[in-house]
């Protein structure tokens, strides 16, 4: 479904992506791991067409979006949902209005139809009946769930998750992991997840890719990552500083 080919991107002469090659299959959950500031969010923005590469290609179902005009990229982008790291809810809107926002902006549905969809999406994330609450009244975990409800409001085929468990306690992290798994199975979504949470990664991933110094240095299923002979991979999984890996 998604194919990245020799992707390059620099900002002010700082090379962030240095020849990324990656394939993401329909209906799988891939988790992209790597150090903070290593380019994972930049990679995510290339997949959804928010950033154009300096060189290379991004294919969505064999369509190279790097060659499309903005209006055509917009059509492709409607196939995506995105859960931002902080949920990115509008504080001045109720939960119901937040979830309804993309439907009101991009469809001709009636208010009644939109309200029914909103109620259904909230039920999908286990938060029925909170349409009239404001984000300030919600816990961090509830905000993430509302953000996910908004991400699936337009029935996307692909959802991008930017650090979905950041800032959550272990119990809520486990709940979000189960929610991602449940939503993916129920809706047959393709999920691309950025995460630093190793335990969460092994729980939800069908496939893991590690980004290091602008390249994908290893891709495989969780078991192959656990048994990886790459010292950089093992160092990251075990929390060993890079200078100690190199010196050893």
Image (cartoon, rainbow, N blue to C red):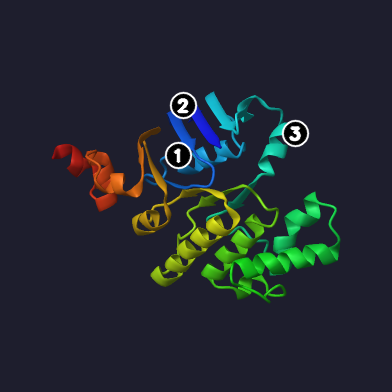
Q: Quadrant of residue 232?
A: top left
- Residue 196 in sight from this viewpoint: yes
Residue drawn at the location 46% of the way across and 70% of the way down:
172
The residue carrying mark 1 is: 39
Residue 207 drawn at (x, y percent)? 41, 45
Residues at marks 3 and 2, CA–CA distance in whole angstroms: 29 Å
- Mark number displayed over residue 71: 3
First-in-chain label (3 vs 2): 2
| Element type where label 1 sits in the image | loop
- Residue 86 in sight from this viewpoint: no
Whether 201 is drawn above or below 62: the answer is below
Quarter of the picture holding the C terminus? top left
| Element type where label 3 sits in the image | helix
Whether 134 is drawn above or below 103: the answer is below
Label 2: how many residues lie within 10 Å, few (<14), some (14-19) or many (20+)? few
The residue carrying mark 2 is: 13
First-in-chain label (2 vs 1): 2
Residue drawn at the location 54% of the way across and 42% of the way down:
26
């Amino acid at each position: 479904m998604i194919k990245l080919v020799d992707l390059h991107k620099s900002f002010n002469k700082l090379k962030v992506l240095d020849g990324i090659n990656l394939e993401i299959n329909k209906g799988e959950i891939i988790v992209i791991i790597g150090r903070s500031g290593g380019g994972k969010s930049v990679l995510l923005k290339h997949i959804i067409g928010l950033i154009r590469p300096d060189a290379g290609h991004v294919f969505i179902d064999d369509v190279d979006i790097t060659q499309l005009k903005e209006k055509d990229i917009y059509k492709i982008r409607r196939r995506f949902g995105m859960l931002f790291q902080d949920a990115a809810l509008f504080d001045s809107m109720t939960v119901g209005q937040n979830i309804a926002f993309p439907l009101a902006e991009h469809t001709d549905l009636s208010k009644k139809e939109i309200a029914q969809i909103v109620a259904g999406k909230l039920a999908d994330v286990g938060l029925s009946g909170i349409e009239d609450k404001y984000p300030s009244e919600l816990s961090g975990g509830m905000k993430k769930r509302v953000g996910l409800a908004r991400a699936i409001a337009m029935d996307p085929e692909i959802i991008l998750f930017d650090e979905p468990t950041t800032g959550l306690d272990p119990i809520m992290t486990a709940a979000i992991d189960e929610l991602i798994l449940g939503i993916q199975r129920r809706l047959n979504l393709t999920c691309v997840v950025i995460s630093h949470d190793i335990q969460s990664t092994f729980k939800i991933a069908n496939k893991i890719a590690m980004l290091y110094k602008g390249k994908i240095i290893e891709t495989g299923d969780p078991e192959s990552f656990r048994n990886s002979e790459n010292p950089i991979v093992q160092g990251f999984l075990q929390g060993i500083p890079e200078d100690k890996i190199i010196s050893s």
